[in-house]
Image: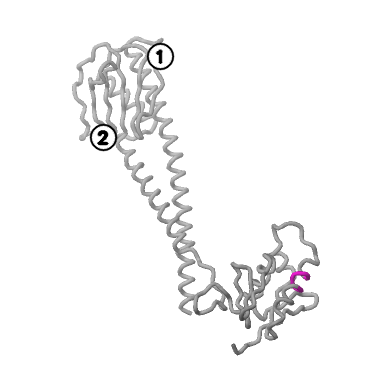
């Protein structure tokens, strides 16, 4: 009873771990899809920002260069030509474009000079207006080559969440292997824990494809081993012909109807030295391995 309870617990842990692994995988895939959608929205919003900044410079012809994602939550906007940046206008158009795209309201923006990558202007925007840090209002920046970089501070939480799901996925897969339900060993395994099965007066070595009785060793073919293993696992029980054929010959080429009878006949002959073992044909149904208790 205790063994059965332990096995049931192992199965519960095993299937629970598989469910957790499946859930973690779905969450990771969903997270990746959300990140992809978010990235596309950011690039659209930044191009809108770039367009408005160029229009504020009376420039409707020069190009906005492709927006690049330079880090997990950081994006860069750059321009074909030099422009003048008005901090008040920059803050306003960024806020408007981000709101339209429904982007997070917690971000840090830096304007960098192309020549030396020095930060010429920056500001911090929070969900709470009281926490905004927006310096240098009204002080225009001279016409130069600039790049604008935006880091979304709320996205770090998404990255941390992804790490958590990865850890959970790894742990659940590991747990599934640890609690994988072990196949119950054949009851006839000898108490000395050697690799044979006691079968009447014989010692049956499935891995070595042989039977041993006293000093007599009998070799077995692969099919004979597979058939005898099925019989040993189900002593004194009728095994249907269809089941024997399916388990031994499935995926091993064409099965000829008389093949089973031929191998059964060979096994009978090899087991004939022990009168306590009978491999009996149950007409029209299958075969049964009859075992009688033997005094060794």
| Main SS of residues in magenta | helix
Q: Residues within 10 Å of mark 2 (few under 14, many from 20)?
A: some
Q: Is residue 262 magenta?
A: yes
Residue 146 vs residue 263, the one in the foreground? 263
Report the span colored magenta: 261-265
Residue under the point 40% across and 48% down:
166
- Seen in the image, is 265 located left or right of residue 141? right
According to the picture, the residue beneath numbered tag 2 turns out to be 126
The image quadrant of residue 294 is bottom right
Label 1 and label 2: CA atoms lie apart by 30 Å
Residue that extends furthest to the front in the rendered view of this protein: 215
- Seen in the image, is 227 located left or right of residue 122? right
Residue 162 image point, x, y percent: 38, 45
Secondary structure under tag 1 reads loop
Q: Residues within 10 Å of mark 1 (few under 14, many from 20)?
A: some
Secondary structure under tag 2 reads loop
- Seen in the image, is 241 located left or right of residue 65? right
Residue 213 vs residue 62, the one in the foreground? 213
């Amino acid at each position: 009873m205790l063994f059965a309870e332990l096995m049931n617990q192992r199965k519960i842990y095993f299937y629970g771990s598989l469910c957790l692994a499946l859930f973690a995988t779905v969450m990771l895939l969903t997270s990746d899809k959300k990140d992809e959608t978010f990235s596309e929205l950011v690039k659209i919003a930044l191009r809108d920002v770039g367009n408005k900044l160029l229009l504020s410079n009376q420039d409707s012809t020069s190009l906005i260069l492709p927006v690049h994602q330079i880090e997990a939550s950081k994006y860069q906007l750059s321009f074909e030509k030099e422009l003048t940046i008005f901090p008040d206008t920059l803050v306003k158009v960024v806020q408007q474009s981000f709101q339209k795209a429904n982007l997070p309201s917690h971000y840090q923006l830096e304007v960098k000079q192309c020549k030396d990558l020095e930060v010429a202007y920056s500001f911090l925007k929070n969900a709470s207006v009281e926490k905004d840090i927006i310096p240098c209002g009204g002080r225009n920046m001279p016409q130069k080559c600039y790049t604008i970089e935006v880091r979304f501070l709320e996205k770090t939480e998404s990255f941390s969440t992804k790490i958590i799901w990865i850890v959970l996925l790894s742990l659940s897969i590991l747990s599934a292997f640890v609690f994988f339900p072990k196949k119950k060993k054949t009851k006839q395994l000898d108490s000395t824990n050697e690799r044979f099965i006691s079968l009447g007066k014989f010692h049956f070595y499935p891995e070595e494809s042989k039977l041993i009785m006293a000093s007599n060793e009998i070799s077995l073919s692969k099919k004979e081993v597979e058939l005898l293993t099925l019989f040993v696992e189900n002593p004194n029980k009728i095994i249907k012909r269809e089941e024997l054929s399916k388990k031994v010959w499935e995926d091993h080429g064409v099965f000829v109807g008389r093949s089973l009878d031929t191998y059964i006949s060979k096994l009978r002959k090899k087991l004939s030295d022990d009168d306590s073992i009978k491999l009996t044909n149950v007409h029209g149904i299958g075969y049964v391995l009859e075992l009688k208790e033997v005094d060794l």
